[in-house]
Image (cartoon, rainbow, N blue to C red):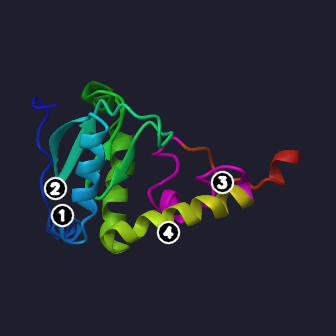
Amino acid sequence: MSSDPVLPHTRWTRVRTVLNWINLSTPLGLLIARIGGATIARRGRGTYLATGYRFGFPVASAFTVGSVITSRHDAGWFRERPVLLRHEDRHCTQYAFVLGVAMLPLYFLCVGISYAIAGDHSSYNPFERLANLADGNYPPPRTRFSRHR
């Protein structure tokens, strides 16, 4: 990843970076990545990319905690998926708005609501919808009832 250009900061990403350190979500994300055996590299815009994560939870190609984007894949896999990185970058912003680690229980509550309505964790999860479902490689929203037609 070191050969990739560092993404430039904007005024907002500087604020987001500070907020995610203060609200402890970025330190938590770095700790999770380190415990998971990931290799951590600065990505720019105050974010980190943690690759080679070895645990099977959460079941996702990538997940974000604070300003840390973590995946079992390597950096080359991400270079081929810039849209997914934009999706995960939006989650970094959500951590700043939702006061950091408080986002985790709210996110899982929204996962439960989405499962109840649609049978999947993303269709009616506002965090995933605001990060753009398509960019995260999620199907368009549906309900359990719409599948029976």
The kind of residue on which mark 3 rests is Pro
Estimate how packed mark 3 is, as few (under 14), some (14 to 19) or many (20 or more) residues with alpha carbons within 10 Å.
some
User: Toward the viewer: 116 or 126?
Assistant: 116
Q: Disc 4 versus disc 1: distance between alpha carbons? A: 21 Å
Mark 1 touching mark 3, by CB under 8 A? no
The kind of residue on which mark 1 rests is Thr
Magenta extent: 117-137
Mark 1 touching mark 2, by CB under 8 A? yes
Please give left or right for residue 90 compared with residue 145 in the image.
Answer: left
Say the numbered circle drawn on residue 37. Answer: none
Residue 75 percent across, percent down from the top left: 25, 29
Residue 114 sits in quarter: bottom right
Is residue 81 in the magenta section? Answer: no
Q: Disc 2 versus disc 3: distance between alpha carbons? A: 31 Å
The kind of residue on which mark 4 rests is Leu
User: Toward the viewer: 137 or 121?
Assistant: 121
User: Toward the viewer: 118 or 56?
Assistant: 56
Q: Which residue bears the numbered disc 2?
A: 46
Residue 52 sits in quarter: top left
Residue 11 percent across, percent down from the top left: 14, 69
22 lies above or below 130 = below
The answer, for residue 8, to whether it is visible in the render is yes
Say the numbered circle drawn on residue 106. Answer: 4
Q: Is mark 2 on a helix, strand or loop?
A: loop
Say the numbered circle drawn on residue 141. Answer: 3
- 4 or 2: mark nearer the eye: 4
The residue drawn where x is 18% and y is 64% is 17
The residue drawn where x is 41% and y is 34% is 55
